[in-house]
Image: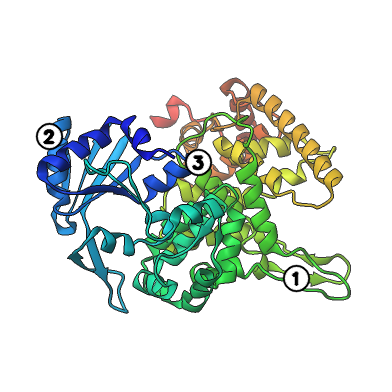
Amino acid sequence: MNFSEILHTHSIFDTIAREADVLGVDAYVIGGFVRDLVLNRPSKDIDVVCIGSGIALANAVGRALTTNVAVFENFGTAMLRAGTWEVEFVGARKESYRSDSRKPIVEDGTREDDQNRRDFTINAMGISLSKKTFGELLDPFDGLKDLKRKIIRTPLGPDITFSDDPLRMMRAIRFASQLNFDIEPDTFDAIVRMNDRIGIVSRERITDELNKIILSPTPSYGFKLLYHAGLLERIFPELVALKGVETIEGKGHKDNFYHTLQVLDNVAHRNQKGELPAEPENYELWLRWSALLHDIAKPATKRFDARVGWTFHGHEDLGARWVPGIFRTQKLPMHENMRFVQKLVRLHLRPIALTKETITDSALRRLLVDAGNDLDGLMALCRADITSKNYEKVQKHLRNFDKVERKLHDLETRDQLRNFQPVITGELIMETFGLPPSKEVGELKTMVREAILDGLVSNTMESAYPFLLEEGHKRGLFVKTMSDER
């Protein structure tokens, strides 16, 4: 691979090289950009290391490109944007760590020092941006060879690397999951030995890596590595509690841990052909979290019935109640994304019941109303939840879901229930009968709502208001007139 030729196709590298030469410093692009360049993966982040002041080089490049430079004096770094690129500049450094902290003691260092402190060999490769050696690959740890072998390996001894920064244990698994690489045996053994060190890492940093594993092409691979490394028990014990099969009187149940990972993969793989429409930013992450949590309360609801075997009655409701606590522990956002996951966990069994031929329009209407704009996500989760090894059984269930979706589409087209709001409000009921806020107002409002969902009346004033008057009359209520106010 001719790195010089490739770099020359992007003017940003020529600019950096020219300004480094003017300043009389050596500069290198090191890390993920080089890795992704070799793998032919898209990349927008460039890390530039120079032997000297990274901030001075950034300012020089910023002036040359007439772009703003963000300087972070405390960290000795600077950042600028150049087109689609986000370029970070730092001076070469070496780091040392205390045993109880991830915050390093930082000193100026050589290019070799800087490469030594990198997490993995595939991230320690550098390309020279200096005038005399422009495009030369600097690969002291055979990262290029590891890329070809698809291996995650630490540049120094793994015990040193992980003790210095325990988050690197999560990053090793994240890269393996994203790239479909193996973790070199000695490196993985070190993770197993040192998994307790993850306890000094902030939950936010752990969850950031966890989200990247969830978004990887086949996320189950990453979760299986987390489990076998002993990390999953430490960072997500509720998920580990799903593992295992219990048998009584010859009756067992599926291993809900592996079932959950299969559902997660099914969601991840559902759009491999690019057939789905574009989705809102971050939608994919939260849909995958709903897959991860959909059966999370099964261990707490597991019961054995001699007649039917194992049951998990109510696990969807209990799981939904657990979602806020799990989000809080994982330092995930406690807003509409959490509510989306909570809704899908609570409703994930409902569409299955609707696959019966005898299902009523009333039940379909209620699902439309309860799911609202999240119906498509719910149906994607339900389809992913079919994990039988029997291919014909899976196809039969999927065909049944096709029928349900057609019925839901027809009902939605006719009744417009996605964002259902009854035309009869509590305020209208109080005004009509001269009632104060009360239980009776709520009961009348519920009766009108149920009548609309049952198809007895339409959600229009012409149809629903006479029904309200009739129900009020049955209760001995009378329409308030102008004379009542005098």
Mark 1 lies on a secondary structure that is loop
Mark 3 lies on a secondary structure that is helix
Q: Residue at x 84, y 38 (%)?
A: 358
Q: Amino acid at mark 1?
A: Val
- Residue at the disc numbered 1: 245
Q: CA distance from mark 1 to mark 2?
A: 64 Å
The disc, 2 or 3, on the residue closer to the chain's N-terminal end is: 2
| Horizontal and vertical percent position of residue 323 | 52, 58
Q: Amino acid at mark 2?
A: Arg
Is 289 in front, or is 209? 209
- Residue at the disc numbered 3: 283
Q: Is residue 477 visible?
A: no
Q: Residue at x 52, y 67 (%)?
A: 236
**Count of numbered labels shown in the rendering:** 3
| Horizontal and vertical percent position of residue 471 | 64, 35
- Dot 2: few (<14), some (14–19), or many (≥20) neighbours within 10 Å? few
- Tell me the tag on residue 63: 2
Q: Amino acid at mark 3?
A: Tyr
Q: Are marks 2 and 3 in contact (CB under 8 Å)?
A: no
Q: Is residue 386 visible?
A: yes
